[in-house]
Amino acid sequence: MSFQDFDPAHILLNYTIDNTPVSVSFAALNLFQADSAKQGVIQGLGIGTGVILALVSWCSIANKKTPVFILNQVCLVLMVVRSILYIVYLMGPLNSLGFNFTNIYDTEWTAFRVSIAVTVVYVLLIAAIECLFVFQVYVMFKGCKTKLWKFGMVAFSSTLALAVVVIYVCEATFNLRDTWAGFHGIPRSPHWRINLPYILFCISVNFLSILLIGKLAMAIRTRKILGLKQFDALHVLLIMTLQTCIIPSAMAIYNYTSHERSPIFVNLSVIIIVCNLPFSSLWASSANTSSVPNSCLNSVFSRTSSRESEETLAFSFRSKANPKSEYVASTDIEKDSGEGSIAEDATINKILREIEMESRYQAR
């Protein structure tokens, strides 16, 4: 047999552990190194995107004292910290070829402490994500007149979030116990228990995505009934792509329905979910009855009408040219804008009353 027909990946490495012969191919070693490299790239992606989004959110959000902004920043910071610790774990002895193919560990326990820190920070990240999910549901149904829907949705999302956090805490405990069991040759936990926390987390992500997509459909319908300016096609596509968590929801469903779940895909989906949270929070807190369609409330990306922009620009030029008349100019603009907003609110309330009266008449 020539060397051209020989695959070096099929070469077996034979060694003995406690008088037990073990064989490992080069293909298994290459696969392990490739998975470790992919995990490192994904965690580096999480660090970069987390830092950039945290800085962009800090510079673009107007009101930084809202619970949504604080929870978003907490999620981004926890994701960055967890990714850094995970890279330290990947470079440590617990991810070495010697430990994973022999289960022999004879060094200090610093690496095990890093593994504990990674697990604890990950559980805190999941808890922060679930808290933000619940708060987004609360914001979306805050103005709902039907108390059953409002309290029912908030109660369901809170119960689901609590179940996810509790299951993840239990899984973290079992995971650390499995790591300890690997040192002593004790069998690990079954796969169904390992997959249960991620399945519940996928359910919570899909639930929030359905609510955000439903809000978009209701916003389009409400603006059509009120005769307001509709979202353009590009704006709808932008909302669907970035502000409804549909991409991480699809990734979660794909990873759940796949034949073999990959931890690489799990980590990537969690990072994408955290990166989508600032955008979905803006859509969850946006109003649908303004004259100009807007999906980025409380940010510098809010869409305003050209008339409002011209008035603001003209006021800034007048205040610079004549500082003494600043109070008078601001008073005039506030008066004009106040009258316009009052008239607009009155028109919208009148239309809403007519729709409500018509629905009552049809119900009779």
Image (cartoon, rainbow, N blue to C red):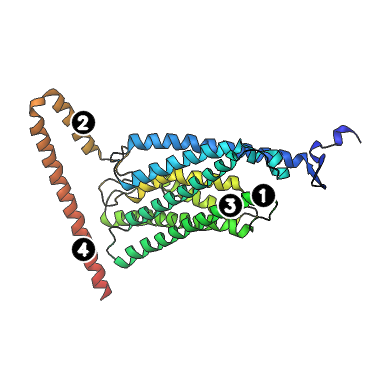
- Real-space Cα separation, disc 3 to disc 4, in angstroms: 59 Å
* Label 1 Cα crowd, 10 Å radius (few <14 / some 14-19 / many 20+): some
Quadrant of the snapshot with the N terminus? top right
Amino acid type for the residue under numbered disc 1: Gly
Q: Residue at x 16, y 31 (%)?
A: 315
The answer to whether mark 1 and mark 3 are in CB contact below 8 A is: no
Q: Which mark is residue 119?
A: none
Mark 4: amino acid: Glu
Q: Which residue is mark 1?
A: 182
Q: Earlier in the sequence, mark 3 or mark 4?
A: 3
Q: Describe the element under mark 1 as helix, strand or loop.
A: helix
* Residue 261 can be seen, yes or no: no
Q: Foreground: 304 or 9? A: 9
Q: Look at the image and tell me whether residue 175 can be seen.
A: yes
* Kind of residue at badge 2: Leu
Q: Tell me the number on the disc at residue 175.
A: 3
Q: Helix, strand or loop at disc 4?
A: helix
Q: Residue furthest right?
A: 1
Of badges 1 and 4, nearer the viewer stands 1
Read off the residue under disc 4: 354
Asked whether the residues under the numbered discs 3 and 4 touch, taking CB atoms below 8 Å apart as contact, a structural biologist would say no
* Residue 112 in the image, given as x and y percentages of width and height: 59, 43
Q: Earlier in the sequence, mark 2 or mark 3?
A: 3
Quarter residue 226 falls in: bottom left
Per the image, the residue denoted by label 2 is 313
Label 2 with label 1: CB-CB less than 8 Å? no
Sequence order check, earlier mark of 2 and 1? 1
Q: Nearer the viewer, residue 121 or 333?
A: 121
Q: CA distance from mark 2 to mark 3?
A: 59 Å
Answer left or right for 136 relative to 50.
left
Relative height, residue 346 to residue 6 (above, below): below
